[in-house]
Image (cartoon, rainbow, N blue to C red):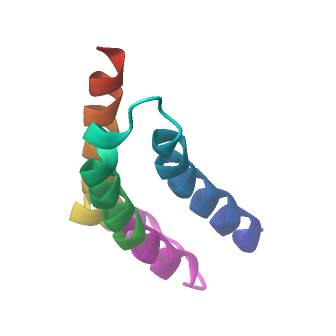
């Protein structure tokens, strides 16, 4: 079960970068894709650390949610979403 969740999470994070590269004019987004990829790798490492634990309690989940790495990815995605709406 954990392996399936980890795989699904990895695929979701990587899909964002692939979709941006498919834009008609990706040049303005290229640098940001690098930022998103970096932040996604960091967040993925934090999620993997949590998933590797034998028990996942609420304190661990709270700390993951508060992680600057996870928040960076969310902020990147919110920024990108707004930019693509224009």
Magenta stretch, residue numbers: 43-62
Residue 50 x, y percent position in the rendering: 48, 76
Q: Is residue 75 left or right of residue 13?
A: left
* Residue 79 visible within the image: yes
* Residue 74 visible within the image: no
* Tally of numbered tags: 0
Residue at point 41%, 63% (across, down): 61
Choose top left, top right, bottom left or bottom right for residue 67.
Answer: bottom left
Q: Is residue 6 left or right of residue 46?
A: right
Quick one: quadrant of the N terminus? bottom right
Q: Please, is residue 72 above or below residue 76 in the view?
A: below
Viewer-nearest residue: 6 or 80: 80
Q: Is residue 64 left or right of residue 14?
A: left
Quick one: quadrant of the C terminus? top left
Is 58 covered by the magenta stretch? yes
Choose top left, top right, bottom left or bottom right for residue 65.
Answer: bottom left
Residue 56 x, y percent position in the rendering: 53, 73
Q: Please, is residue 19 above or below residue 6 in the view?
A: above
Residue at point 52%, 77% (across, down): 48
Is 69 covered by the magenta stretch? no
Viewer-nearest residue: 32 or 4: 32
Residue 24 x, y percent position in the rendering: 47, 29
Residue at point 73%, 73% (across, down): 3
Residue at point 35%, 28% (across, down): 81
Q: Please, is residue 80 above or below residue 51 in the view?
A: above
View extreme (left): residue = 68
Q: Main secondary structure of the magenta part?
A: helix
């Amino acid at each position: 079960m954990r392996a399936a969740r980890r795989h699904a999470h990895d695929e979701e994070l990587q899909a964002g970068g692939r979709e941006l590269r498919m834009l008609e004019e990706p040049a303005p987004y290229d640098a940001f894709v690098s930022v998103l990829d970096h932040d996604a790798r960091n967040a993925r490492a934090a999620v993997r650390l949590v998933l590797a634990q034998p028990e996942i309690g609420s304190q661990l989940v709270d700390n993951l949610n508060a992680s600057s790495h996870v928040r960076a990815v969310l902020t990147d995605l919110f920024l990108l979403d707004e930019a693509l709406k224009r």
